[in-house]
Image (cartoon, rainbow, N blue to C red):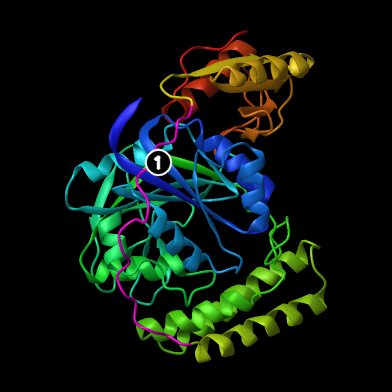
Amino acid sequence: MTQGPTVSVIVVSHGRPDDLARCLQGLQQLDYAPFEIVVVADEAGLKRVSAMGWAERVKTRRQAVANISQARNQGILAASGDILAFIDDDAVPEPTWLAALVAPFSADDVAAAGGFVRGRNGISFQWKARYIDEGGQAQPLDVDPGAVTVLKGRPGYAIKTEGTNMAFRRDVLAGLGGFDPAYHFYLDETDLNLRLAEHGARTAIVPLAEVHHGFAPSDRRRRDRVPQTLFDVGASTAVFQRRHGFGPEQRLICRENERKRLLRHMVAGRIEPRDVGRLLATLEQGFDAGAARSLGPLSPLGDAAEPFLEFRGFGAGATTALAGTPLKRAALDAEARALVAQGQRVSVFRFSHSALFHRTGFVEGGYWLQTGGVFGRSDRDQPLFSLWKLGRRVRQEIARVTPQRGISGPGDL
């Protein structure tokens, strides 16, 4: 197990107790010490934490209002670690996530770090490295996918960290006033990245610090990622424009991006033409609200209110690999659950003799499951069909994920 500085992992949750429970089960399997968990959630989320028997294992704070910046600041005030790491409630970290994300802080001049984020299929990347240009727009950043890259920010060039996979030195983050509560949702971490850049802070991009982000449904979006409302997008864009002195083009870019996104949903049949106008109207309402929102100065946040509460998870150990075809589904599931109950990390590779695309994720039962065809693609740049034998394909997939998963063997074939 990696030993390093004390780390507080902060999870904000609102209206998603099931996703929160899944995230916490993933955090339980982190191969890092010492760390604590701070959960800032609504009543439903806190009840789920209690039902899991975790009320005494983690720090909790109640946040009834859906304001992610305010909730994260509550988490900062409760957190006692030297490093503060953030993950969303609808995300699950790879077991090596925290060790990889925190490692760059061994250099005294590193103030922040961010990792890569995989999307719903568990294979494709949702976000890799990005930077924020002088117009406040996120742009792709080319980095070595197998190494840590440390970059220094400056006015007009900020290193982007993703809200579901980022870490900061507590003294730096608290000294900047944490997150701006004027951003209820959207652009909250981008605003912070710009403030860090203004101070010339160094940010580490850590590709092997991976989380899987599910984009769970909420009061803002459906399960298929169709927005329910664009109000907060508009409001935060207007706040962002005012905070950083951007001109009217900020709203024009936002309006055009959202219009294109809605049209893609319409073409795919997820929404009707009339929904495009209705949702764009909520964007305009948000613009007006953000333009009128009070913007006060950000004051430094204080020291932690409580001592460090070290979380005791699975501890040191590698991930066990199990493999087979769908005919062994029940047996693989039973064995995986039994091993997890014993405190072991488990990855199951269940492949059919087909060319189905692969998917992977952290499933009920507390283990990682990869499914697909023996002949199908996992990485989406692979051929549509490749001739493999089951055992060789399993070993190939184990090798692909071992840097993030820490798998110990070739699988039970």
Quadrant of the image containing the N terminus: top left
Residue ID at (62%, 17%):
388
The reply to whether residue 120 is visible in this rendering is: no
The reply to whether residue 70 is visible in this rendering is: yes
Q: Secondary structure at mark 1?
A: loop
Q: Quadrant of residue 321?
A: top right
In the image, residue 164 lies at what x, y percent?
49, 52
Q: Quadrant of residue 328?
A: top right
Q: Amino acid at mark 1?
A: Leu
Residue stretch in magenta: 294-313
The foreground one among 380 and 221 is: 221
In the image, residue 266 lies at what x, y percent?
76, 68
Left or right side of 280 for 77: left
Q: Is residue 245 magenta?
A: no
Residue ID at (42%, 73%):
180
Quadrant of the image containing the C terminus: top right
In the image, residue 136 lies at what x, y percent?
39, 74
Residue ID at (38%, 32%):
32
**Callout 1: few (<14), some (14-19), or many (20+) C-alpha neighbours within 10 Å?**
some
